[in-house]
Structures are given as structure tokens and as C-alpha cells.
């Protein structure tokens, strides 16, 4: 799989659990509740939809700060040439992280972006301004990560049966491993690639899923 993927996308998605969290709304004087959930953050190859690196966090974790860790992990196994992301990830730290591994970063820019911060951010912003059509061809590969999340939830469930945070996270990671095994098998048939599957369920890679407390 490592030889097939050079273009990647990053995003996050939630998985609900079997436990409900309750609280009292002082404004309305009512008892409220909602299903507890955890969040999967993942870097996905846009050719095969393999999950190259991921981490499961508490629901409050924002997406953007997860990029440096995940793209560095993906680069240990894959030749990451470019990464696409939505505007939540558009920041100087994330440009620096992709620069550090020699990859080009194609995020969506916020409406108030100017490129005045300089560096790789400014270079990408000006490339976007000068040739939006070409830039968006790279950016729209981001839809593959959404397709991957959809496939995982469709095949293995969008909810977890676990009732505490750690086991919820472990269950989501298990779904990712199952997805990668399916991806390896599908790629082997479609592209004639001989799979090499280790005990972790990844194609000759270090673990594709890393648990964050």
C-alpha cells in the first residue's frame, strides 16, 4: 500500500456510544441528556482510502492541532507528497508540519485570508488566487476522507457498544483496522498488488491507529 499512495487527506468524525451523559440546564430548568461520543482523526490515502495514521480522542478535541502528529506518523511509512484539508486546518503550524516532511499542503482558505503571514502559507494562498481551478483539483481530494469515514460507519457501525471512554476509543480503532484489512484485500484484487499483512492488520506498516488518552 505504501507504494500506491502519495496524496492524502485529513479530517475528523464522531462515533457515539451506548452511554448517555446527563446535565441540568439552569436557563430552562430542564434535565438534558445526549449520547457520549469520541472523535476519530485520520489521514487517508486518496487512491485506495487506506487509513495511513489515526488517533481517537475525546469529543472536545479540535481537529487542527492533530495534523502535525498524524502527518508525521503517516510519513514514516508513506511517501507523502501532498495533503488536502478543510479550512479548519488552515494555519501556519500545519503548513510548517507539512513542510517538515516535504509535502505540499492544500487546505481551503478562510474568507479573511490574505497570505500576509508569509512563508508556505502565503505561497499556497497566492497559488490559489492565481489558478483556483488547478488548486481545487488538489483540494477536492479531501472528499476521499469523508468517503472513508462513511465506509467505516456503513460497514462496521457508526456507534460503539462500549460504555466508557477508553473502550469506546479502542472499539473505534478496531473499526479502522477492519477497514484497512478490507482495503488491502480490495486493492489486491483490483490492482493486482500482493498484500503483506502484519499482526496489526496493516500492510507491512507500523500500527495505523494510535490511541490518545
Image: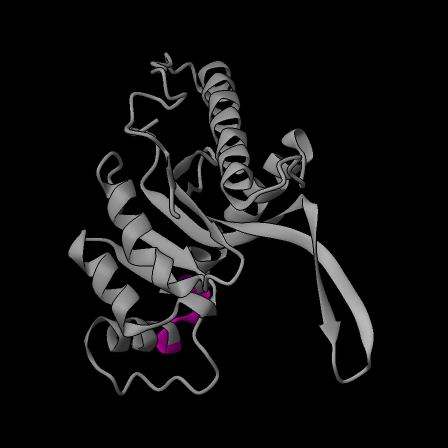
Q: Nearer the viewer, residue 46 or 151?
A: 151
Residue 42 visible in rendering: no
Instruction: Indicate left or right for 14 with 46 as reference.
Output: right
* Residue pictured at 18% horizontal, 53% vertical: 102
Secondary structure mostly taken by the magenta-highlighted segment of the chain = helix
Side of 146 relative to 68 (left or right) = right
Observer-nearest of 168 and 199: 168
Q: Quadrant of the N terminus?
A: top left
Q: Is residue 123 above or below residue 42?
A: below
User: Is residue 64 something that shows in the picture?
Assistant: yes
Residue 206 position by quadrant: top left
Please tell me which residue lies in front, 141 or 135: 141
Q: Which residues are magenta?
A: 129-135
Q: Tell me, what colour scheme is on the image?
A: one colour
Q: Residue 143 placed where, x, y %? A: 54, 51
Q: Could you say where residue 78 lies in the image, as x and y percent from the top left?
A: 27, 36
Q: Is residue 210 magenta?
A: no
Q: Position of residue 87 (x, y in %)?
A: 46, 69
Task: From the top left corner, tell me how far across and down residue 207 is, in percent.
Answer: 33, 30
Task: Give the vertical position of 60 relative to 92 (above or below).
Answer: above
Please tell me which residue is depicted at 75% across the width and 61% down the height of the picture.
33
Query: With 182 as the anchor, is 35 left or right in this view?
Result: right
At x 42% / y 14%, what residue is drawn?
192
Where, by quadrant of the figure, is residue 152 drawn? top right
Is residue 20 found left or right of 61 in the rendered image? right
**Quarter of the image where one finds residue 18:** top right
Amino acid at each position: 500500500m505504501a507504494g500506491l499512495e502519495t496524496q492524502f487527506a485529513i479530517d475528523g468524525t464522531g462515533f457515539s456510544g451506548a452511554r448517555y451523559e446527563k446535565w441540568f440546564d439552569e436557563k430552562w430548568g430542564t434535565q438534558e441528556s445526549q449520547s457520549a461520543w469520541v472523535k476519530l482523526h485520520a489521514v487517508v490515502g486518496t487512491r485506495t482510502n487506506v487509513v495511513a495514521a489515526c488517533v481517537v480522542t475525546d469529543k472536545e478535541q479540535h481537529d487542527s492541532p492533530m495534523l502535525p502528529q498524524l502527518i508525521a506518523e503517516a510519513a514514516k511509512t508513506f511517501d507523502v507528497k501532498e495533503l488536502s484539508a478543510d479550512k479548519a486546518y488552515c494555519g501556519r503550524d500545519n503548513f510548517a508540519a507539512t513542510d517538515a516532511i516535504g509535502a505540499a499542503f492544500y487546505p481551503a482558505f478562510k474568507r479573511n485570508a490574505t497570505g500576509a503571514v508569509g512563508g508556505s502559507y502565503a505561497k499556497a494562498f497566492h497559488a490559489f488566487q492565481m489558478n483556483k481551478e488547478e488548486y481545487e483539483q488538489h483540494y477536492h481530494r479531501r472528499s476521499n476522507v469523508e468517503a472513508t469515514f462513511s465506509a467505516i460507519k456503513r460497514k462496521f457501525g457508526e456507534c460503539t457498544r462500549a460504555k466508557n471512554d477508553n473502550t469506546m476509543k479502542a472499539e473505534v480503532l478496531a473499526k479502522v483496522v477492519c477497514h484497512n484489512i478490507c482495503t488491502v484485500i480490495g486493492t489486491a484484487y483490483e490492482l493486482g498488488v500482493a498484500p503483506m499483512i502484519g499482526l496489526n492488520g496493516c500492510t507491512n506498516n507500523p500500527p495505523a491507529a494510535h490511541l490518545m488518552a
